[in-house]
């Protein structure tokens, strides 16, 4: 996976390059927001359930990777 600088830093860019870079960055941020909204909600729910039950939370079972 490329670093942020390798992926988004442009040296002497044209307008189309800047626009393409900005769209890629916006899509990346949108994917992080979607990830936070989906898996983040599942983790928070499982955490609250584990606290109520007094059991430890197993992230692997919640995330499923």
Image: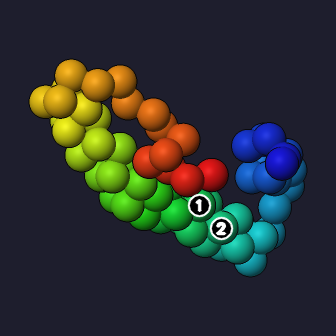
Q: Residue at x 47, y 37 (%)?
A: 59
Q: Which residue is mark 1?
A: 28
Image point (49%, 46%), residue name = 61
Residue 53: x and y in percent read 17, 30
Q: Which mark is residue 24?
A: 2
> How many dots with numbers?
2
* Percent coordinates x, y for residue 65 in the rendering: 62, 52
Q: Is residue 15 left or right of residue 63?
A: right
Residue 64, position as x, y percentages in the image: 55, 53
Given contact means CB atoms under 8 Å apart, are the residues at marks 1 and 2 in contact?
A: yes
- What coloring was used for the rendering? rainbow
Question: Considering only vertical position in the picture, is 8 above or below 59?
Answer: below
Residue 52 position, x and y percent, is: 13, 30
What residue appears at the point 59 percent right and 61 percent down from the top-left corner? 28
Q: Is residue 42 visible?
A: yes
Judging depth in this view, the residue of 29 and 46 nearest the camera is 46
Q: CA distance from mark 1 to mark 2?
A: 6 Å
Quick check: 17 above or below 52? below
Residue 24 as seen in the image, left or right of residue 51: right
Tag 1 secondary structure: helix
Disc 2 element: helix
In the image, residue 44 sits, relative to residue 27, either above or below, namely above
Could you classify mark 2 by the number of other residues whose Cα lies within 10 Å: few (under 14), some (14-19), or many (20 or more)?
A: some
Q: Residue 33: name its quadrant.
A: bottom left
């Amino acid at each position: 996976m490329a670093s942020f600088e390798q992926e988004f830093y442009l040296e002497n860019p044209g307008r189309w390059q800047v626009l393409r870079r900005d769209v890629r960055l916006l899509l990346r941020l949108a994917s992080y927001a979607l990830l936070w909204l989906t898996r983040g909600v599942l983790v928070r729910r499982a955490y609250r359930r584990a606290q109520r039950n007094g059991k430890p939370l197993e992230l692997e079972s919640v995330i499923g990777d």
